[in-house]
Amino acid sequence: MQYFPFVVVAWILAVGLYGIVTSRHLVHQIICLIVVQSSTYVLLLGVGYVTGAVAPYYFDVKVHTPAVDPVVQALALTDVVVEAAVTALLCSFAIQAHKRFGTLDPQELASLKG
Amino acid sequence: MDQLLAFVVAVPLLVAAAITAAGPLLGRRRRLLDAIAILAAASVAVMLAVIMVRTAGGDEVYWFAGIRPARGAVIGIDFEAGSLSAGLALLAALLVTAAMTFSWRYFQRVATHYHTLMLTFLAGMAGFCLTGDIFDMFVWFELMGVSAYALTAYRPEERGPLQGALNFAITNSVGAYLSLSGIGLIYGRTGALNMAQIGVYVSRHPASQLVVVAFLLIISGLLIKSAIVPFHFWLADAHAVAPTPACVLFSGVMVELGLYGIARVYWSMFGQALGHRAAISHVFVALGVLTAVAGALFCFRERHIKRMLAFSTISHAGIFLTGIALLTPLGLTGTATYVAGHGLVKAALFLCTGIVLHRLGSVNETWLHGRGRHLRVTGVVFTLAAFGLADLPPFATFLGKGYIDDSAWAHGLPWVMGVFIACAILTGGAVFRVAGGVFYGLGDAPSEDAEMAEMASEETSETGSDKQRTPLTMIIPPALLVACAAVIGLITQLGRAVQAAAIRFEDQAGYNATVLAGAHIAHPVAIAASESTGITVTDVLTGTGSAAGALVLACLALYWRRLPLLRRGYEPGAGLTAPIQRFQSGVVNDYVTWIVLGLACLGGVLALVVR
C-alpha cells in the first residue's frame, strides 16, 4: 500500500480549508472550495489505482491482466458534475453580490445593512 | 408494483424537467404550472404513504434495472424502504405539497424555476431517504443541497438572501466533500458502495482506525446539514432569509434528514464494527444536549420571527440527536414520532409567519406588536402550533419527547428530562411571546425607535405587503398541518407500530440479509429490550408542565417591565447581544473555522473512545 497519494490528499484538503478560512474575496473562496473538492478526486483515484495495471478496457489484452478499478473513475466523474453545479451556482451568487453591493469581501458583505 | 419505489423519485424529476422545458410555452398560464407541481408533489406523498403502510411488515428492496446481488457482492444500485425511511420521505412530500399550495397566492410573480427547484428538492429528499447505496446518498444529498441553495437565494437582489445562500452553500459543500472523502476511504477498504455490503465487510474484519476516520468523515457532512452545535451557524442565516415556503422544508424536514442519514449510516454500516456502544452513545448524547440548550437560549432572545423559529429548530435537532444517540429502540421511536410532530407544527408556524409577512410586511416581533390583532384565524392557528411546539398533549411532539425522556431515564440519564423541559419552556415561551404580542396585543407596547423601523423593513419584497384578505390557500395548509400533528398524537397504536419499525431500523444483520439475500425479516432482533410505549403519568405531566411553563415564561417576557424585581431601563438579554453576534458573525470564514475545530475535537474524542 502506497501512502504517498493519501498524504497529497490530506495536504490538498488542508490547503483548501485554510484558503476558505482566510479568504477575503468570494471568487478566491469559491476556488478554495474547488481545491477542497480536488482532494476527493485524488483520494478516489489513489484508492482505485493499481500499480502496473492497464486501463479497464479489456480489449486486446490477455485474460487476468490486472486493471485499475473502473468504479472510481465513474465516482470521480459524478463528483465533477456535482462540482460544476455547485460552482456555477456559487459564481452566480458572487456575480450578483458584485453587481448589487460592489464588494466581494465576505466580511464587508456581512457588515452591510439592508 | 415493485417500481413504486423508483417512481417516488422519477415522478418529481421528470415533472421538473418537463415544466422547465415547457416553461416558455406555458408563458403566463401560471396556475397550470402551480397545479401540475402540486399534483406531482401530492402524488409522491400518496405513493410514499402506500409504501410506508406496505413496509410495516418488512422492508422492501428495489434493484434498478433488476441487477441483483450475487453471492453477497453488489453491482447494482438499490432503494431500500422501511417504514421509518418511507415515513420521513412522506413527511417531506407532505410539506412540499403544503408549501406549494401556500405559494399559490403568496408570490406575486413566480418564475418556472421555483417549481422546478421545489420538485428537485423533493426528489433529493425522497432519494436520500430511500437509497441503499452510500455514494448515491452523497449524490442525493448534493441534489437536495443545490436545490436548497438556489431556493435560499430566490431573491438574489437583496443582501440577506445572497449572503445566507453563500454561507449555506459553502459550509454544506465543505461537509459534502468531507463525506465524500469518507466514502472514498471506506470504498478503498471494502471495495463496496452498497451500505449492506460495507456493513457485512467491516463487521467481519477487525476494527481499524481507518473505519473510525471514515465514519467521522461521512457523518461530518450530515452533522453540518443537521445543524448540530458547533456546525449550526449557517442555519439561522439561511432560514431567516429564504422564502417562507422554502423555510418550511428546511426546518420541517431537511435538518432531520441529516440526522436520519447519521442513523442510517450508523445502523447499516458502522454499528457493529465500531462497538463501544455506551461510550459512543455518551459522546453523541452530550453533543445533542449541547445543541438543544444552545439553540433554545439563542431562540429566546431572538426578535426576528423566522430566525427565532430557526433557532428553535436547532434546539429540536439536538433533542432528536439525543433520541437517536441513546441507541435504544424507544429512543429512536421517540425521535421518529417527534420529527413527525415537530415537522408538521414547525411548518404551520412558518406558514403563519408567511401570512403575517404577506399581510403586514414584516417579521420583526417588536415592530409587529399588536398589529396582528385583525388576523384572528392566523393567530389561533399560530397559537395552537405553539402549544404543539411546547409539547402539550395530545400533539405528537409530546409523545415523541415522552419516549425520549423515558428511554433516557431507563438508561441512567434522568437529568436529560430536566434539560429538555427547560429547552421546551424556552423555545415554547419565545413562540408564545410572539403569539401574545403580535396577535393579541398582550404585554407592554415596545418603544419605537429608528433602528427598529429599519429592521422591520428588512423583508418586504418577498410578497406584496398590505393585502386586505388572507387567501384560503394560505390559511388552510397550516390549519391542516396542526390538525394532523394532533391527530397523529391521538392514534393509540402509534407507539407500538413506530417501535416495531425502529427495531427493524436498528437491526443491522436484518438489514444486510434483506438487501443482500432478499430475505424477508418478519421478526427483527432488537439491539436492546423493547420498552413499553404506554403513556405514563410522567409523560403527560412533563408535557403539560412544559407547555404551562412556556406560557408563564411568555407572560413574564411580555410584562417584565411591571416586575418589581427588575430595575427600570433594563432590557432582558441586552448584555448577551454582543457575544452572540460575535459567534453568529455572518462571515462564512468563521463558520468553516468552527466546522474544522468541531470535527477535530469530535475526531479526537471518537479516537480515544474507540480503541
Image (cartoon, coloured by chain):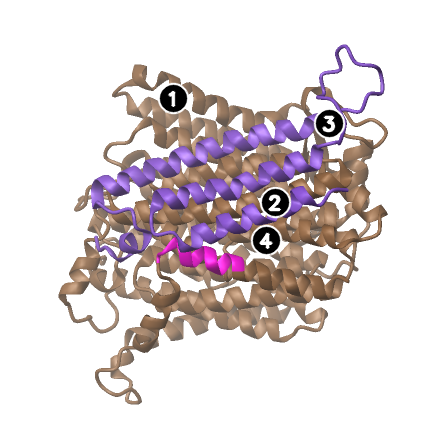
Chain colours: A purple, B brown
Choose between B353 and B16: the one closer to the eye.
B16
Question: Dot 3 lies on which element?
Answer: loop
Which amino acid lies under the numbered mark 3 shown in the image of this protein?
A: Val
Q: Which disc, if any, is residue B154?
A: none
Task: Return the disc, 2 or 3, that comes first in the chain's sequence.
Answer: 2
Q: Is residue B443 left or right of residue B555?
A: left
Same subunit, tags 2 and 4: no
**Tag 4 residue:** B337
Where residue B456 sits, quadrant-wise, is bottom left
Q: Quadrant of the C terminus of chain B?
A: bottom right
Residue at image coords 32%, 77%? B575
Label 2 environment density (alpha carbons within 10 Å; few <14, some 14–19, many ≥20): some
3 vs 4, front mark: 3
Residue under label 2, please give it: A8
Mark 2 belongs to which amino acid?
A: Val
Residue A26 in view, yes or no: yes
Asked whether B466 or B473 is in front, the reply is B466
Q: Identify which residue is drawn at 39% across, 65% down.
A: B583
